[in-house]
Amino acid sequence: MTEQVYRFSTGDEKAVERVVFDENIHYLHMVFNRGEGLPEHYSNSNVYMTVIRGTLSIGLNDQGVHEYGAGTLLKIPFNTRMNVKNLGPNTLELIVVKAPAPKS
């Protein structure tokens, strides 16, 4: 078989899954219910964040929280302070790609 196959969860349970973590990219699948999210942190690469379902509430650097719905792709530069949350009533599902893959 030439291709490699990767799988990720399809439910509503909280998840932060490292689907592909190699020298080229980091590809993550995340699911957050209302009030859940990530600890505030700085991006360690260029981050491409796709909202699959729900509404992403995100604060970047010193700007206020912005909300983005399903079908939105955000490009977030390296070394940006990020505060990622689900403040909406529905389950939030994201695909996050870091490219190039962080060195550490």
Image (cartoon, rainbow, N blue to C red):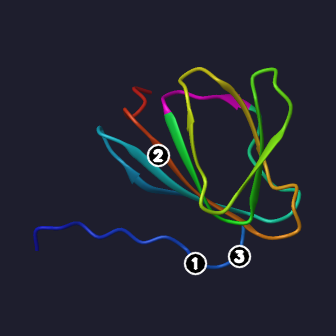
Tell me which corner region of the image, top left, top right, bottom left or bottom right, holds residue 19.
Answer: bottom left
Residue 73: image location, x then y, percent: 56, 49
Q: For this rendering, which residue is in front, 59 or 4?
A: 59
Q: Residues within 10 Å of mark 1 (few under 14, many from 20)?
A: few
Q: Residues within 10 Å of mark 2 (few under 14, many from 20)?
A: many
Q: Residue at x 59, y 29 (%)?
A: 43
Q: Amino acid at mark 1?
A: Thr
Number of dots carrying numbers:
3
**Labelled disc at residue 12:** 3
Q: Residue at x 81, y 25 (%)?
A: 63
Q: Residue at x 47, y 46 (%)?
A: 97
Label pair 1/2, CB-CB below 8 angstroms: no
Query: For the magenta stretch, what is the residue range?
Result: 41-46
Q: Amino acid at mark 3?
A: Asp
Choose the circle earlier in sequence order: 1 or 2.
1
Q: Which residue is mark 2?
A: 97
Label pair 3/2, CB-CB below 8 angstroms: no
Q: Which residue is mark 1?
A: 10
